[in-house]
């Protein structure tokens, strides 16, 4: 049996901050507080976007690598969070939404 849900993907960089706090921490705290079922932060090794390249130097120094936060839950739970999510991410990243089916 399959269930229709939303997948929200947030693309930011590791060093992105708002008010001195990393965006990934702000987003995760907001999702936990809202009672979202779960989220995963993925670390990228290379990427680029409107703000330029984001890469990871494998010689021991980390340089603003890309992060993807993936959230899957019911639309009714995630849709009300979009304005707050957009205010946290702002122009620092990209938020995308997909209808998915979970089995």
Image (cartoon, rainbow, N blue to C red):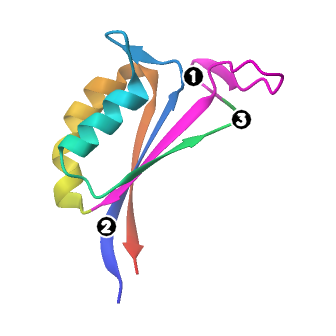
Circle number at residue 5: 2
Distance, label 2 to label 1, CA atoms, is 29 Å
Region rendered in magenta? 48-73
Residue located at (31% from left, 67% from top): 5
Where residue 79 appears, x then y in whole percent? 21, 49
Where residue 65 appears, x then y in whole percent? 64, 27
Helix, strand or loop at label 3? It is: loop
Does residue 33 show up magenta in the picture?
no
Q: Is residue 83 left or right of residue 94?
A: left
The N terminus lies in quadrant: bottom left
Residue located at (21% from left, 32% from top): 84
Q: Earlier in the sequence, mark 3 or mark 2?
A: 2
Helix, strand or loop at label 1? It is: loop
Residue that carries the numbered disc 3 in the rendered image: 45
Residue that carries the numbered disc 1 in the rendered image: 50
Instruction: Give the class, few, some or many, for how many residues have Cα within 10 Å of label 2's Cα (few <14, many ≥20).
Output: some
The C terminus lies in quadrant: bottom left
Q: Marks 2 and 1: which is nearer the front? A: 2
């Amino acid at each position: 049996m399959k269930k229709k849900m939303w997948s929200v993907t947030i693309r930011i960089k590791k060093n992105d901050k708002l008010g001195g706090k990393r965006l990934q921490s702000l987003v995760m705290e907001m999702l936990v507080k809202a009672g979202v079922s779960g989220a995963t932060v993925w670390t990228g090794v290379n990427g680029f976007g409107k703000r330029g390249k984001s890469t990871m130097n494998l010689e021991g120094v980390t340089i603003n690598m890309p992060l993807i936060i993936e959230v899957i839950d019911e639309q009714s739970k995630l849709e009300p969070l979009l304005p707050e999510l957009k205010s946290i991410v702002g122009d620092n990243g990209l938020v995308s939404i997909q209808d998915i089916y979970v089995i």
